[in-house]
């Protein structure tokens, strides 16, 4: 595995799963894992096994529901779908993430400023 | 979050289905991945390997899923618990003795805790019980009769004090079976207590049915009413729900039942331990009782926020204004210094504090011995299992996990032991609560309650940690390689174990010897109490409450009544004395070790009363023959039927009272016999006899003074007929009752009480504590013996090889036996010495409980030491014998 892959932050996997289910409808565990890997452009270091811990967490909170069904290639699999409560939570969490990443961006940019200032001085000189 | 917690708990219980679900899901996942990989052109093996790698391992995925899903810590604990129960079931030789030992230790502790909690820790069963005070003079030798006040004194106190919400009291001098209930032609004796009408309001007792007393019920001439105790209502009236409002024929009067008391209020349990009180009636304080003198006790309820010290100050300030009888101004002020409120609870159970603390310490020691024994057992087990644990450690179990497993084991044992112990305690308490004859307060209210349950859990956990810790730490500290190599015999680790086990044995013997010394001292005290000269002879004598009707219509002066009574008594005694086997019979209105009273202190004429308060002699109004029937010796003559109202008034006084009078009067021969005492009447009182001192208050306290008046000259308010016989008293019960009924058909089937029961009743608290401590000491001795046996026997087993070698080298059987035995006795001697030291140091704690016995009583100490040595020798002999039977060839081949 290339060393440049990103380690997942605590809690981010749950949000990714919710996003996947809200965008794609009902899916089985393997499908969700593959989808996240594809969407992330294979940049995420996803241990596929952890998806099941995430799924049981979300299901216990009532944000997703599961049902045994049959997949496109005729295999028995457990399908997960987002619930109304899950959708609400997903929206709240999305707003939260957007705000957080926005703040992070601003803070990180701010830290760059002292490095810029000498350049500005150099221009006036 | 709540929802997730709930789901996790559900998941914890629905493991199997969820695991199967997960397995199917993971299998599907792998299949999907393989399919995709195959499509990408990988070989089947490659496809499978890649799929598993991407998943990050099946087992890890399972673990992560379970962690997120359920309660992992609890899972591990449950697994340990299951494992523990399996191993315990497979080793009954260890489990049964371990649980039994714990059950005994915990059971004894819970039972005694309940007793201590009921008598000492818990407030009395009344609302705001800390406000209740008992108002009495400082303790004196005349007991209850000096702890009472007259109507006028009570009134003054009630009106004059400011710190009390209200003050109440009860009539202290009614005897047992003072009621005759006539029901369906049958006459049933019962006991009631007269109380001031506000009694229940002050105590805060509410009726279970009907109502309790109103002030009007206590007015002179009010229609008679009665309140039934819960127990009597159930026993006598079959718990009749419609009893309130009905009338009863009591003492040939129509009395209305106005209420039934709740089961939580038992007058006897609180105020008169060891006696049963069936009913409560109101006293008409302002009728005749006004002139009866000191008759009622005082119980007060302090206002909220008033401290005991304030109440005492208040009482002391009012006391000088209180009069014995307002008609006699010279009787005012005699209560000065005699009106002291104390916490009602201290009055009721304060003097038991020391005994209870000793009892509590005794069961504490039992628990310690039990824990030491269990530590021993567990240690032996964990040593035998050290290889198992070393193996588990080698396979990757952390030290914490192994200690956790061991603690789980001790906890499981403690829970089993506590459950069995609770059952034991329940039985013990049930038995204690039904010991009606033991004169201990509140005994009938004993039960296993929430506090006792909490206490059980606490000591079970403490015990588990105490006895589980030693083997646990030992195992944890143990070196893995050493354990795997250690063959158990003679290695360094083995020696260290030996030392630790010796410490356990010494501790056990020391604890047992402390217990035995206490029990021995209490037993000797008890034997001394039984030996006390009571001043009367309780064996082969019995008393029965005789009922008579001495009313004479239109008798103004009371003289005719008195004459009629004398005739009735004379007939009764003559009739009873004619029964074969009856040697003597006589009547008194009170009996020693029962209720009593005093009527002031008659002194020789012309003598100035000594300063300070003297406890006056207790008064008995007796018939001729009473003292002979009691077995009390008299110098001079007995009272006679000829001592009439118009002849000289005569008395018999007790020896020590006579000595006191002689000291005041300077009579020529220094003898009170034949002298005249001044009681305010013109003729005075002629002392015609000097009687032996009688222990009338308790068998242990100093004898007070007694004065005996003849029934022919003094008012008597009850008739206790005492019979002395050559036959066992019980065999006469029927013929005596028949004789009484032939004279008075209204005589109820009163109880025929051997005088010994009065003595036993008085001794019952001491007997109770002695028996409790003695049984705990016996239990301690047994546990110590088992402990010694266990340790020595285990040591012999460990040393089988060594003994085998020694025997092969020529040691004789006797030599081997002697060595094992002397090792045992050495430990016992150290333990005994240590225990004796502790006992000597703790002597102060127990000294106040002893009677005529020194806390350093040599006989007890020597007897205890001998007993323990014998027990240790027996416990050590069995393994020693086994050691000497070791066959060297077999021993050397083993291992």
Image (cartoon, coloured by chain):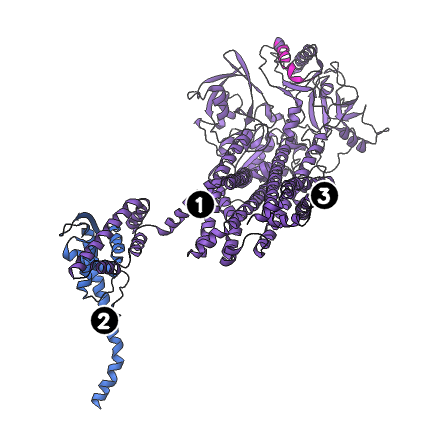
Chain colours: A blue, B purple
Q: Of helix, strand and loop, which one carries label 1?
A: helix
Q: Which residue is mark 2?
A: A105
- Which one is nearer the viewer's eye here, B121 or B806? B806
- Res B130 seen here: no
Host chain of mark 3: B
- Which one is nearer the viewer's eye here, B717 or A52? A52
Q: Could you tell me how far apart the alpha carbons at marks 2 and 3 are, in whole angstroms?
A: 86 Å
In the rendered view, does B97 fall on the left or right side of A124? right
Q: Where is residue B704? Give x, y as percent.
A: 71, 31
Q: Which mark is residue B84?
A: 1
Q: Is residue A64 above or below residue A35?
A: above
In the rendered view, does B511 fall on the left or right side of B475? right
Q: Could you tell me how far apart the alpha carbons at marks 1 and 3 are, in whole angstroms?
A: 48 Å
Host chain of mark 1: B
In the rendered view, does B673 fall on the left or right side of B490? right
Q: Within the magenta stretch, is there residue B735?
A: yes
Q: Which mark is residue B856?
A: 3
Q: Within the magenta stretch, is there residue B809?
A: no
Q: Is residue A55 above or below residue B641?
A: below
Q: Is residue A3 above or below residue B880?
A: below
């Amino acid at each position: 595995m290339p060393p440049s892959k990103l380690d997942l932050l605590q809690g981010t996997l749950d949000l990714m799963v919710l996003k996947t289910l809200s965008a794609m409808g009902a899916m089985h565990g393997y499908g969700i894992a593959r989808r996240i890997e594809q969407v992330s452009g294979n940049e995420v270091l996803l241990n596929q096994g952890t998806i099941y811990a995430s799924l049981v967490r979300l299901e216990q909170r009532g944000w997703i529901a599961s049902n045994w069904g049959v997949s496109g290639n005729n295999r028995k699999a457990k399908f997960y779908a987002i619930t109304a409560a899950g959708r609400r939570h997903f929206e709240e969490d999305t707003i939260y993430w957007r705000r957080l990443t926005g703040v992070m961006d601003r803070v990180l940019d701010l830290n760059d400023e002292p490095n810029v200032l000498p350049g500005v001085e150099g221009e006036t000189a | 979050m709540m929802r997730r917690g709930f789901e996790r708990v559900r998941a914890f219980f629905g493991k199997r289905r969820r695991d199967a679900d997960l397995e199917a899901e993971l299998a599907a996942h792998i299949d999907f991945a393989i399919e995709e990989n195959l499509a990408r052109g990988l070989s089947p093996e490659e496809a499978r390997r890649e799929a598993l790698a991407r998943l990050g391992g099946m087992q890890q995925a399972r673990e992560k899923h379970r962690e997120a899903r359920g309660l992992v810590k609890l899972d591990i604990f449950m697994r340990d618990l299951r494992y523990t129960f399996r191993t315990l079931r497979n080793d009954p030789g260890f489990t049964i003795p371990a649980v039994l030992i714990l059950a005994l230790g915990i059971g004894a502790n819970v039972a005694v805790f309940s007793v201590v909690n009921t008598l000492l820790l818990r407030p009395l069963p009344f609302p705001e019980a800390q406000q209740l005070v008992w108002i009495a003079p400082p303790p004196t030798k005349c007991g209850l009769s000096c702890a009472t006040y007259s109507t006028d004194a009570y009134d003054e106190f009630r009106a004059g004090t400011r710190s009390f919400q209200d003050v109440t009291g009860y009539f202290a001098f009614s005897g047992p079976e003072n009621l005759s209930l006539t029901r369906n032609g049958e006459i049933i004796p019962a006991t009631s207590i007269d109380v001031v009408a506000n009694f229940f309001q002050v105590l805060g007792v509410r009726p279970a049915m009907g109502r309790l007393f109103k002030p009007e019920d206590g007015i002179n001439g009010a229609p008679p009413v009665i309140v039934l105790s819960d127990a009597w209502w159930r026993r006598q009236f079959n718990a009749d729900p419609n009893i309130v409002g009905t009338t009863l024929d009591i003492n040939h009067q129509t009395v209305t039942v106005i209420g039934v008391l709740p089961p939580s209020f038992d007058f006897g349990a609180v105020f008169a331990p060891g006696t049963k009180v069936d009913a409560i009636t109101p006293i008409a304080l302002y009728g005749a009782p006004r002139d009866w003198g000191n008759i009622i006790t005082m119980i007060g309820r302090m206002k909220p926020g008033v401290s005991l010290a304030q109440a005492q100050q208040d009482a002391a300030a009012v006391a000088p204004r209180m009069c014995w009888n307002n008609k006699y101004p010279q009787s005012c002020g005699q209560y000065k210094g005699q009106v002291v409120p104390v916490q009602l609870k201290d009055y009721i159970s304060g003097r038991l504090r020391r005994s209870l603390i000793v009892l509590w310490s005794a069961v504490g020691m039992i628990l310690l011995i039990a824990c030491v024994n269990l530590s021993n057992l567990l240690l032996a087990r964990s040593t035998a299992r050290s290889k198992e644990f070393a193996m588990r450690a080698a396979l990757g179990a952390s030290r914490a996990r192994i200690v956790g497993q061991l603690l789980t084991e001790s906890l499981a044992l403690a829970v089993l032991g506590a459950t069995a112990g609770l059952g034991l305690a329940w039985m013990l308490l049930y038995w204690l609560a039904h010991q009606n004859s033991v004169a201990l307060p509140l005994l009938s209210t004993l039960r296993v309650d929430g506090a006792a349950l909490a206490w059980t859990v606490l000591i079970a956990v403490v015990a588990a940690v105490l006895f589980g810790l030693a083997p646990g730490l030992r195992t944890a500290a143990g070196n893995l390689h050493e354990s795997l190599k250690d063959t158990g015999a003679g290695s360094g680790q083995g020696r260290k174990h030996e030392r630790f086990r010796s410490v356990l044995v010494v501790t056990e013997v020391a604890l047992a010897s402390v217990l035995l010394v206490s029990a021995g001292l209490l037993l000797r005290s008890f034997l001394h109490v039984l030996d006390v000269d009571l001043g009367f002879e309780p064996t082969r004598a019995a008393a029965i409450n005789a009922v008579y009707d001495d009313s004479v219509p239109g008798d103004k002066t009371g003289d005719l009544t008195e004459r009629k009574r004398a005739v009735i008594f004379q007939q009764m005694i003559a009739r009873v004395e004619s029964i074969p086997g009856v040697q003597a019979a006589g009547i008194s209105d009170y009996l020693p070790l029962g209720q009593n009273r005093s009527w002031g202190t008659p002194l020789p004429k012309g003598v100035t009363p000594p300063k300070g308060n003297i406890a006056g002699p207790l008064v008995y109004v007796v018939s001729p023959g009473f003292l002979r029937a009691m077995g009390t010796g008299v110098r001079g003559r007995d009272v006679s039927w000829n001592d009439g109202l118009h002849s000289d008034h005569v008395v018999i006084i007790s020896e020590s009272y006579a000595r006191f009078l002689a000291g005041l009067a300077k009579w020529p021969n220094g003898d009170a016999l034949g002298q005249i005492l001044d009681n305010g009447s013109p003729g005075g009182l002629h002392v015609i006899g000097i009687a032996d001192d009688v222990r009338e208050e308790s068998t242990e306290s100093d004898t007070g003074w007694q004065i005996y008046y003849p029934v022919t000259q003094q008012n008597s308010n009850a008739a206790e007929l005492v019979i002395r016989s050559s036959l066992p008293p019980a065999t006469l019960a029927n013929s005596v009752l028949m004789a009484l009924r032939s004279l008075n058909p209204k005589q109820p089937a009163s109880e025929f009480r051997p005088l010994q029961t009065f003595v036993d009743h008085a001794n019952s608290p001491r007997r109770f504590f002695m028996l409790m401590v003695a049984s705990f000491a016996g239990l301690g001795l047994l546990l110590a013996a088992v402990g010694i046996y266990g340790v020595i026997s285990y040591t012999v087993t460990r040393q089988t090889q060594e003994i085998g070698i020694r025997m092969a080298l020529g040691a004789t059987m006797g030599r081997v036996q002697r060595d094992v035995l002397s090792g045992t006795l050495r430990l016992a001697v150290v333990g005994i010495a240590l225990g004796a030291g502790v006992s000597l140091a703790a002597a102060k704690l127990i000294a106040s409980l002893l009677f005529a016995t020194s806390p350093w009583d040599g006989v007890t100490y020597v007897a205890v030491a001998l007993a323990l040595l014998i027990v240790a020798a027996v416990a050590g002999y069995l393994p020693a014998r086994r050691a000497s039977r070791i066959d060297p060839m077999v021993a050397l081949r083993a291992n």
